[in-house]
Amino acid sequence: MKIVIVGGTGLIGSKVSEKLRILGHQVVVAAPSTGINALTGEGLAEAMEGAEVVVDLSNSTSPEEETAINFFRTAGKNLAAAEMTAGVKHHIVLSIVGTDRALYIGYLRAKKEQEDIIKASGIPYTIIRATQFHEHMTTLIAVQSDEQAIHISNVDYQPIAAEDVAALVTRLALEEPKNTTVEIAGPDRAPMNEFVSHYLSVKGGEKPLKVNNDNKYMFFEIPKSLLVPQGDFYPGAIRFCDWVNQ
């Protein structure tokens, strides 16, 4: 089966591409570096010819609101048009748990628009919303640190390893379209500060951890349970403690 991976050179895309190739599928990696650009439309028509499945793992160059909305709106419309012409049978979008519960955040509003474009396109689809990746831990610590300490909230947290994300995206890409939104998350749920504390205990850190109940993630005030699934979800297999110790 021919499968197009949009954003196929990224953290998740490269893993998904490899997994699908191992399973014997014809994989087209769609990225500006391969001459296929969802934002400009370059190479899309050729890439989609004969494709049955498209997996959209693309991302904007910046989480800033205007940049993100322009990217996901334009790329989403370009992809939908090319897929309709080619007769693609299944479109998968990787999105974020909590997207529709914090639309005051520009990046989440952009991701919601990406979801809505494919819902309205008439193409059979599966939207996969993932929790935060284990691999984002260093960014979280860096953003929420000042000269004196690492300031981390006790909001609910349930991160997932990139390897598990890739495995679940691969699995769902090969199943029938759900025509709905599903969620994926790691096997462990706890306050965010507990994950950071464990990470620092293993990896070390020069600053102390200070816990607060500000319900803050990165630069934003958020609902306490924004970052975790609200109901049923597909669980990853890799526990956070095992990932840290790798």
Image (cartoon, helix red, strand yellow):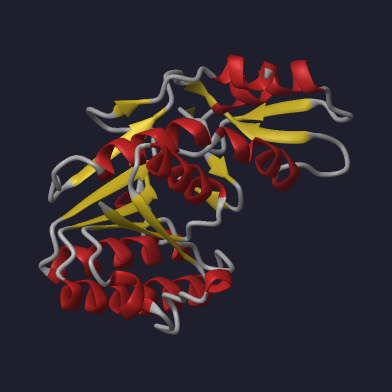
Q: Is residue 158 positioned above or below 145 on the image?
A: above
Q: Position of residue 22 (x, y in %)?
A: 42, 38
Nearest to the observer: residue 44 or residue 74 = 44
Q: Residue 157 location, x and y as percent?
A: 48, 29
Horizontal side of residue 169 vs 124, given as left or right: right
Residue at point 29%, 70% (across, down): 48
Q: How many marks?
A: 0
Q: Relative to 229, does residue 62 appear above or below in the rendering? A: below
Out of 191 and 184, give the one closest to the viewer. 184
Quadrant in which the C terminus is drawn: top right
- Residue 40 visible in image: yes
At 37% across and 80% down in the image, what residue appears? 74
Examine the rendering and report whether any part of residue 227 can be seen: no
Q: Is residue 109 left or right of residue 11?
A: left
Relative to 175, residue 194 above or below? above
Question: In the image, 45: left or right of 143?
Answer: left
Which quarter of the picture shows residue 182?
A: top left
Q: Residue at x 29, y 77 (%)?
A: 77
The image quadrant that residue 76 belongs to is: bottom left
Query: Quick check: 238 above or below 118?
Result: above
Report the residue at 47% width, 60% height from top.
Answer: 7
How far from the left and from the top, in percent, is residue 33?
58, 70
